[in-house]
Image (spheres, rainbow, N blue to C red):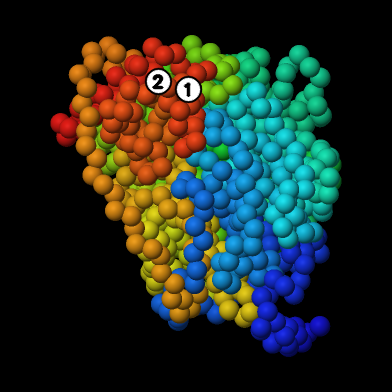
Amino acid sequence: MNHFAVKFVGLSLLAFAANSPAFATKPPAAVDAKRLIAADQEPGNWMSHGRTYSEQRFSPLEQINDSNVSRLGLAWAHKFDDERGVETTPIVVDGVMYSSGPWSKVVALNAKTGEVLWKFDPKVEKVVAAKGCCDVANRGVAVWQGKVFVGSYDGRLIALDAKTGKQLWSTLTVDTKRSYTISGAPRVVNGLVLIGNGGAELGVRGYVSAYDSKTGKMKWRFYTVPGDPKKPYENDAMKMAAKTWDGDQYYKWGGGGTVWDSISYDPELNLIYLGVGNPSPWNPSVRSPGNGDNLFISSIVAIRPDTGKYVWHFQLAPRDGWDYPATSQIIQATLPIDGKPRKVLMQVPKHGFVYVIDRETGKLISAEKYTEVNWADGYNLTTGRPILTGKGDYSKEPKLVYPGTQGGHNWQPISFSPKSGLLYFGETRLPTLHINDPDAKFQDHGRRWNLAEKIVMPETPQELAEMTALVSSSLIGWDPVTQKKVWQIPHKIPVSGGTLSTAGNLVFQGTYDGRFVAYADKTGKTLWESNAQTGVMAGPISYSVDGEQYVAVGAGLGGSFGVTFGELAKATNVPTISRMLVYKLDGKATLPALPVIAKKELDLPPMPGIDAVNKGRELFNNQCVFCHGVAAVSGVSFTPDLRYLSKETRAQFVGIVLGGLRADKGMPHFHIQLTPEEVNLVHDYLIKRTYDLKDGK
Ligand code: CA
């Protein structure tokens, strides 16, 4: 069928469907291998996580373009059930949107009107929140032959009927005695559903599993780091990897290497590329005392889709000690390298470099800095190894390392436009102070931070101001062939959202301070912006229904930045209101007015002694800071600012922390991690912080 005929048939279908919803004309989620591999031929649909298997997040739609984007307005908005961080990329097939939301809940919506078709709640127990590092967000669902798949925060892979939202099967993919969670989107390849997991900050061993989409039965599992050194290796890849680890401590600590985000399928080469995470624990001198690269942490690993068998790997940060997972989006493209077309992968991970890798061999083609980096000067292209500076070696003294644990760029989806030839991604400059804790022991409490580093956070106004002064961020348009920045737009808040590029010469990106913005793809010029009322972190998508183009984005401030970096996140000055926002030309919908927040009074019990405060601070930094924020400053509206505890809450404090009195609100119990005496010390520290607030400190 020629191009004209496709258009003609498309038009006649459109006329036929004009009086009925588009989703009524085809069975729901009727997606198979043929359709997914040819997804580029269906510009109106967004059928897999990165739109096509290439994960480029480029939409060929051009009805909304640089000449009319000023007319963009809200078409509809869907309110998620829970006010938590939203990181989801929705799927759109034949007029129906399938989206995950906080707590791994799933909703199906009429993509034209926002009408709810069904909802599914996996009923994750709220106490599981303590097992995760970074809020209870979920990054998306997958669809295949009438089914919708979601990974639940507590480690289940669940298949739903795409028509009704009823559960068809559910498989537990993790050992619930360890701190595994799932936040990533499943991918479906030839009828196998692939899912990874997270938890390397808390002490787990990473892997990816493949399940039969019909039955939920496991077909294969690929471990990313070696297991118990006393037991036989699972396969030759683990035998090879084990040679790069020293001692037996790593197994106690889990080893890490969790595949918590990126999985990219290459139908051309019949390979799956796994983005393998940081090690557990972070500190290499505790994890693998002698030496060793510690494969396959911080690596991209290529495996076979039907067997899970290892093919090649490229390790970005051998012996990673800085929380540098290679989990960021893995984009496939064919680029002109030295004048010849070459099949490549591109990744812009936390490490601070844009990597271009040959996807047939795993060989590094180029790696260039896109932000401030001090742990490495660059890469030796012959060996593929980073040229270390020594400034990242904290074995003998603390080191301030760039990029920090938020990364130069983290999980936020990025986009590659084959039309402009540019990559579009948010950049963050925010260092981390790494401090060796050589005597650290694995805390086998089922859930607890296991980093083997001392955690010291800024607290005084001067320290907080110093941290803020070190921070900057931007949106970058980058040429991956010349490996040069083409343009850069500064942002006010240190982290920014995912990007989408379109054939309409546009780049869309949300900001953490509550805007959704369209830029000109060649220059970065702002062409349109809209008030999203909340921070926008997720990756936008574009689709069309009945000939009309839409742009959709999940909104809701949270995630690791929102919950941990209170002082910085507070500067966003927006509440968390979790929604799917959908725009079209001349859209006239409006969002309800923001709720008015009552001013809170400070309750000031007697000031505790300095010893109690100091002990309480250490406990707070180890147990509470990752949700309640640095120096107990909350940056998001869903975790209360603990400097404002009321008399009533103070009276119940031990019951809330140990007994789970606020479990229904998402505050897990900590009776495994803390004693009643320790909880009172944390409370003493919080009283001190209330006085600091009163005194303007
Ligand atoms: Ca990590």
Q: Can residue 259 be seen in this view?
A: no
| Distance of label 1 from label 2 (alpha carbons) | 7 Å
Residue 81's disc number: none
The numbered mark, 1 or 2, whose residue comes first in the sequence reads: 2
How far from the left and from the top, in percent, is residue 301?
70, 41
Looking at the rendered structure, the secondary structure element under dot 2 is: helix
Q: Is residue 621 left or right of residue 686?
A: right
Which amino acid, mark 1? Gly
Which amino acid, mark 2? Val
How far from the left and from the top, in percent, is residue 441?
53, 13
Q: Residues within 10 Å of mark 1 (few under 14, many from 20)?
A: some
Q: Residue at x 66, y 36 (%)?
A: 155
Residue at the spot of label 2 = 654
Residue at the spot of label 1 = 659
Q: Residue at x 76, y 71 (%)?
A: 26
Considering depth in this image, is 610 or 224 the residue closer to the camera? 610
Q: In this view, does 229 lie to the left or right of 50?
A: right
The answer to whether mark 2 is within 8 Å of ligand 1 is: no
The answer to whether mark 1 is within 8 Å of ligand 1 is: no
Q: Residues within 10 Å of mark 2 (few under 14, many from 20)?
A: many
Residue 622, quarter of the rendered image? top left
